Amino acid sequence: DSQGSFIPESEQLYKLLIEPIESQLDPKRALAIIPDQALHRLNFPALYSAATKTFLIQQYTILESPNLTTLLSGNSGTPSRGPAVSFGARTDNTGATNELRVLGEIYPNVRTFSGEAALKPAFLSSLREASVFHYAGHSQDAADPLRSSVLLDGQREGPNSVTAVDISKGRMPASSVVVLASCDSSVGNSRDGIGMRGLTSAFLISGAGSVVGSLWLVDAESTSRLILQFHKGFVRNRLPVAVALRNAQLEFIEEGAHPYYWSGFV
């Protein structure tokens, strides 16, 4: 879809969802959205204002939450920038391997698991010690959100799969940050978007303060570039999670990239 044909629909949604409350919004503060039903799948950052000719993400820092309880729970305090853990899959993926290598240059203290080291026990034990946890590999949403899983063996389920139930039973450090940079499968094709009742909720239940992921499958190169820009802003500039993600998205907008490539990341 060309950007031109995308804009009219985006303007209509902006009029429906944002204009009625616009006078109450403060650009100096983050805009927290708790989507309901089909709105879980909506890429709010790409809603377009006909008046200002800008996307919503250009006006506000945006974050989403599965419910008000999670938003107010206090898990999302000031995050630590380390130690970090990066995880790939057991099957080699050139893009993911490069992504993990660059992460090693961004974070001063990072443990990397990939290839034969990418095993379920290591995945679960790493969650207990990681202030930043980055996963670059395959994931799968299920009709039953609790069966949504991280597929460490690649594009298939097996004894090395990590389910939402497995993750929710663990305990992550307070205010830790999880980044789901799935190279070949979306983390958001469940009915509630971004695995809200699946992987995302599992990480939040385990104590994570923030989860960064995508609402749909984006090609590996664009995903990797945006997510690495996020990490640089988060670590080197010590930006809050939502601000670091927004800045990465704004770079894509300045380049004229179609919203498909940047607006599904929340």
Image (cartoon, rainbow, N blue to C red):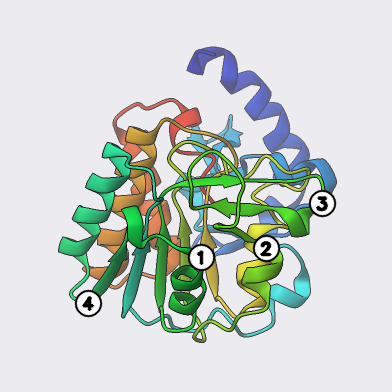
**Visible in this render: residue 197?**
no
Closer to the chain start, of discs 2 and 4, is 4
Q: Quadrant of the N terminus?
A: top right
- Assign a secondary structure to mark 4: loop
Residue 9 is drawn in which quadrant?
top right
Is 142 on the left-hand or right-hand side of 6?
right
Q: Position of residue 101 (x, y in %)?
A: 20, 54
Q: Tag 1 or tag 2, which sits nearer the N-term?
A: 1
Would you name the residue on which mark 3 appears? Answer: 144
Q: Amino acid at mark 4?
A: Asn
Q: Please state which of residues 189 and 258 is positioned toward the viewer in this rendering.
A: 189
- Report how far apart the C-alphas of labels 1 and 4 lie in the structure: 22 Å
64 above or below 188? below
Of the residues under marks 1 and 3, which one precedes in the sequence?
Answer: 1
Secondary element at image label 3: loop
Q: Nearer the viewer, mark 1 or mark 3?
A: 1
What residue would you read off at disc 2? Answer: 164
Q: Are marks 2 and 4 in contact (CB under 8 Å)?
A: no
Q: Marks 2 and 4, how far apart in space? A: 27 Å
Contact? badges 2 and 1 (CB < 8 Å) = no
- On screen, 190 above or below 200? above
Tell me the residue that label 1 is attached to: 120
* Mark closest to the chain's N terminus, 3 or 2: 3
- Mark 4 sits on what residue? 109
Structural distance between the alpha carbons of marks 1 and 3: 21 Å
For disc 4, the neighbor class at 10 Å (few under 14, some 14 to 19, many from 20) is few
